[in-house]
Each structure stands twice: as C-alpha cells, then as structure tokens.
Image (tube, helix red, strand yellow):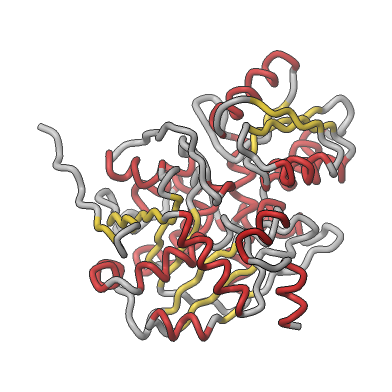
Amino acid sequence: MTSPSPTILTVGGDSRLLANPDLDRSLPYGAEQRAILSREGGRAAHAAIAAWDGYAPTPLLSLDALAQEAGVGAILYKHEAHRFVLKSFKALGGAYAVERLVVSRGSAEGLTVTCATDGNHGRAVAWGARRLGVRAVIYVHETVSQGRADAIAAYGAEVRRVPGNYDDAVRASAEAAAANGWTIVSDTSWPGYDLIPRGVMQGYAVLGLEAEAQGARPTHVFVQGGVGGIAAAMLSWTWESLGADRPILVVVEPNRAACLLESAAARRWTTVGGDLDTIMAGLACGEPSELAWALLSPGADAFMDIPDGRAADTMRRLAELGIAAGESGVAGLAGLMAAAADPAARALLRLDATSRVLCIGTEGATDPAIYREIVGRAAEDVERAAA
C-alpha cells in the first residue's frame, strides 16, 4: 500500500511550499551523517581557506526594512558578492576541492580537472586551478550566458559548450574525464563518485562557521536548492551542534528546476526534466546530489519553489537598499518574503514577530549584463550609491 502524496501549499498564487513528510527531528546527527559532513571538517576547511590571499569573512547584513515588511524580528543576509574575486560562495567549494586534490597528490603536475557548471562552480574550479597551476576543462550547457562562460575562461580554463541542460553537461564532463584520465571536481554526487563532492560541500560549511562567529542565532534558515550542496552544508552545521533545537530550514528552488521539492513530494530521490530554463541559472539543476539528499531528506523542514519574477523583484528591492545581489543569490530571501506574506505559510513555518531569519545571499552580480537588464542599473552604481 503506497503512502498518500504529501499536501503542497500554494503560496501567493505562484509558489509552492511543502512541509517535509520525512522530517525526523529526533534523529541524532550520528556517524552516518558525519561521514558526509561534519563540524570538524568545516573547521579544517576554514583553516585552509583562511590562509588564502584575500580571505575575509563576508558580511552578515541586517535587513531591518525587509524584516519590518515581512513581519519578522530580523532578517540576516550573508552577502557573498565579494567572496575573493568570484562574487560567489562557490569559491569555498570548487577551489577548496582543487586544493585538496593537489595536496593529496603531492603535486599539480599532470593533473587536469573538469566539471559541469551553470556558471559559479566552474568559475571557482577554474580560479582554484589557476592558483595551483592545474589545467581545467569546464563544460557549460547551451543556455549558460556568454558572460558567465567568458568569466570562466578568464581564469585560464578551456570552456566547452554542449547541447541540453545542466545534467547533460554533467554527463559530458564525466564522459570526457573517463576518456582522458581527468579528475572530476563536481558539486554533485552519484553512485561511485562522492569523495570530492564531500570536500566541495565541506567548504560550503565555512559559511555556517562565519555566520556563527558573527553572532547569527537564527530561528529559521532560508537557503537555495540547486543540487542541494549549500542547503546540506547549512543543515549539517546546525544539526550536529543543536540537534532537534536547530533552526527551521527551508530549501528554496526555481519552479522550473525544483528537483528537491519533487523528491520530497515523491518521498524518494528523483529528477525533473525539461530545459530547466530560469534566470536563477545557478539553481537550474534537475538531479539532486545523492549525498546532499541523504541529509536533506530526513533533516530539512520544508521545500519551496518560486517563479523567476520573485527573484527579479527581490534583486530590485535589494538594489534600493544598496545591495547588488545576483539572480540565484536572492532565491532564499525571495522565498522568505513570499512565505511571510502568506498566512498559511507563516503558520506552517512558525514565522512570527520574534523570528530571526538567516538568508544566504550566495552571489553578487556574476553576470553584469543580466544584472543590469533586470535591475536597470549596474551593480557598481548600486553599491556606489550606498557607500
């Protein structure tokens, strides 16, 4: 006998919210979970990354005006727009994984790394490879903007464009790696390939360490989906230390690429098809990371999807506050604002005037042309006006 399908709540007429039917807050963060991600591993990643030239914790901004609009006590926004030179949290994952590879081998000689990307991960891998003298071949799919492809090539990587969507680029990268003896540095995992993605996700946990050191004590975390890596990293950081008393974690995805929400609805790892075309390019993923799903399935509180229009509106609202944030970077905040305006969603997520909500602003204006098209101003002008 099959279980009934979980109820999905329609939010604001254009978004969906699903309370995780398989959530088990009594489940301890045990050896099985720590084998995927651990606070010890996060501290090791922080120690390595903090030694890189240009390292500084990214700011934790208090968005008081938006908190008042949303009817919550505080919105804390971890602003990744100036993480190293990459304008994205991905430097903490892809570049860190490349460094771990070189350290484990004892040399960069003869090493070629490859991956698929919607933009930011490939840029991070290319940057990390250039730092260490490693060759990089990065695969992008047909809808990745030329600006994002050029930004990857600017770090010395060979960029190869393939037909299809992100998941097609993943397969093309894997096939090339097998044929040429290259090493895949991916932020997603699949059967037989999970060691390097663990390192990528472990680097992402540096965000949790920094936010904690900056005084973040959230009751809620709204975080982007994609393949699930950053969401799993943020979940692991609080689950291991706080157990059942951890913040409520909501995973937010584009409605055209909601593979995590659909997996939760199906109560099993599943994929979504189609062209996955969304302005939230960094989240245009149809297949969850199996490692990330192993944590999110029992541990995330809810899954949500939003249309592109909500992301664009949130970019423009942040620009009014002097914050230049990219399309994928605002997804968590956009999800929060949608949920906070809907009485049923507020009740489901226990959002109220005492809530302190942490949102991860995962990227700045990583494609300046697209940013200007959406916001109507250059990112530099937005930030200059706020200075």
Q: Is residue 225 left or right of residue 372?
A: left
Q: Is residue 79 left or right of residue 69?
A: right
Please give the name of the residue rendered at 29% of the width and 53% of the height, measured from the top-left corner: 20
Please give the name of the residue rendered at 44% of the width and 32% of the height, measured from the top-left corner: 274
Is 37 situated above or below 142?
A: below
**Image quadrant in which you'd find residue 266:** top left
Work out which residue is located at the far top of the displayed protein and give it: 179
**Image quadrant in which you'd find residue 215:** bottom right
Is 72 situated above or below 81?
A: below
- Where residue 202 appears, as percent x and y from the top left, is 61, 50
Q: State whether residue 35 appears in this view.
A: no
**Image quadrant in which you'd find residue 47:** bottom right
Work out which residue is located at the far left of the displayed protein and give it: 1
Is 183 situated above or below 253?
A: above
Residue placed most toward the observer, 233 or 284: 284
Residue placed most toward the observer, 210 or 311: 311
Residue placed most toward the observer, 245 or 89: 89
- Where residue 139 appears, as percent x and y from the top left, is 69, 31
- Where residue 234 appears, as percent x and y from the top left, is 51, 59
Q: State whether residue 94 appears in this view.
A: yes
Is 235 situated above or below 285?
A: below
- Where residue 205 appears, as percent x and y from the top left, is 59, 57
